[in-house]
Image: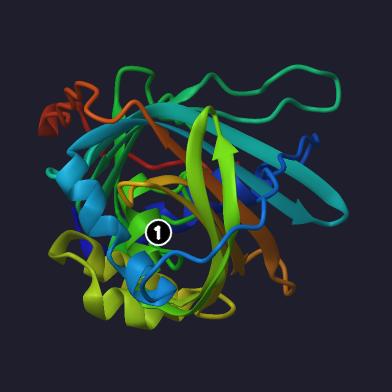
């Protein structure tokens, strides 16, 4: 697939999946943190190592939510699935928000996440139901941190490799697990320099494509240093309007060691036709 066509497809995906679904509202909120003595060590260094800790953990289940505020409307896209951090392969079932009448225009989208690529099934926009859409994430202006309606769990962790400032907020409980809450800001350009080979191009694209490369975040680590929850706040320009769209992406990780079987589609199953703009 030619790079020029990939860029065109990526633009259509962004416009159709993110910018074109501003109809409905549902927010999500993080849990508060109780004050506690700060743990030993530098918070910045602890967060920069978080992605490597996930690789050692092997795999987990994941839940995602992506909130967008644009034109006075707030929408939420939710996802759920599994991820293998060693192979950087994952599968998510992404549910788009309902319209004002309480119905959904889209079936749930199946997304396969791979180093440098995003595969989507049930994408709509004229794509046959039995075909996949493949997008090179490095060609997307956001590096697929926003495009698919869910941030790749490992990419979410790799953003923390660019942590510039971080403070320890306190100790709290998340889904029955004791965690430490940190708050800080990461730089996407710095994250791209330190990222794995599979994530370097995508994060580099995001550093150039977002309204700002600085990403505020809240993250919760368990006593083994594994991310249990991370919430990033992005500022994204979608190309259809002058003002940036505020995007809050939340990733919850649990059930570490869960089995993951992700098989990428064969070339014959990938759609090669034109994707309609929605």
Of residues 192 and 176, the one nearer the viewer is 176
Number of numbered discs overlaid on the protein picture? 1
Residue 134 lies, in percent from the top left, at 28, 43
Residue 69 lies, in percent from the top left, at 76, 54
In screen coordinates, is 155 left or right of 234? left
Q: Mark 1 points at which residue?
A: 8
- Seen at 30% across and 47% down, the residue is 224
In screen coordinates, is 38 left or right of 278? left
Residue 193 lies, in percent from the top left, at 25, 80
Instruction: Rate crowding at label 1 as few (under 14), some (14 to 19) or many (20 or more) other CA atoms within 10 Å.
Output: some
Helix, strand or loop at disc 1?
helix
Determine which quarter of the picture holds residue 145.
bottom left
Determine which quarter of the picture holds residue 21.
top right
Q: Looking at the image, which residue sits at the far front? A: 37
- Seen at 18% across and 52% down, the residue is 1
Tell me, yes or no, if residue 178 can be seen here: yes
Residue 200 lies, in percent from the top left, at 23, 69
Q: How is the image coloured?
A: rainbow
- Vertical position of residue 57 compared to residue 12: above or below: above
- Seen at 66% across and 23% down, the residue is 105
- Seen at 13% across and 45% down, the residue is 86
């Amino acid at each position: 697939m030619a790079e020029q066509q990939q860029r065109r497809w990526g633009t259509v995906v962004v416009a159709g999946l993110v910018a074109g679904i501003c109809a409905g509202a549902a927010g999500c909120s993080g849990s508060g943190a109780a004050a506690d003595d700060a743990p030993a060590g530098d918070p910045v260094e602890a967060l920069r190592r978080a992605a490597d800790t996930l690789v050692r953990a092997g795999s987990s289940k994941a839940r995602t939510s992506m909130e967008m505020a644009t034109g006075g409307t707030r929408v939420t896209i939710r996802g759920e699935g599994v991820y293998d951090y060693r192979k950087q392969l994952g599968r998510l079932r992404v549910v788009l928000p309902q319209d004002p009448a309480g119905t959904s225009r889209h079936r749930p989208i199946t997304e396969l996440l791979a180093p440098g690529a995003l595969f989507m099934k049930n994408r709509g926009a004229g794509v046959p139901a039995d075909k996949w859409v493949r997008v090179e994430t490095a060609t997307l202006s956001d590096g697929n941190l926003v495009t698919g309606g869910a941030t790749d769990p490992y990419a979410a962790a790799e953003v923390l490799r660019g942590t510039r400032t971080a403070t320890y907020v306190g100790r709290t409980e998340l889904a029955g697990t004791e965690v430490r809450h940190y708050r800080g800001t990461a730089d996407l350009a710095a994250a791209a320099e330190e990222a794995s080979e599979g994530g370097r191009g995508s994060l580099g694209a995001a550093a150039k494509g977002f309204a700002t490369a600085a990403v505020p975040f809240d993250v919760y680590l368990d006593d083994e240093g594994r991310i249990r929850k991370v919430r990033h706040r992005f500022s994204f320009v979608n190309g259809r309007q002058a003002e940036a769209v505020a995007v809050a992406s939340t990733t919850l990780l649990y059930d570490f060691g869960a089995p993951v079987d992700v098989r990428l589609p064969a070339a014959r199953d990938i759609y090669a036709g034109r994707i309609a703009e929605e």
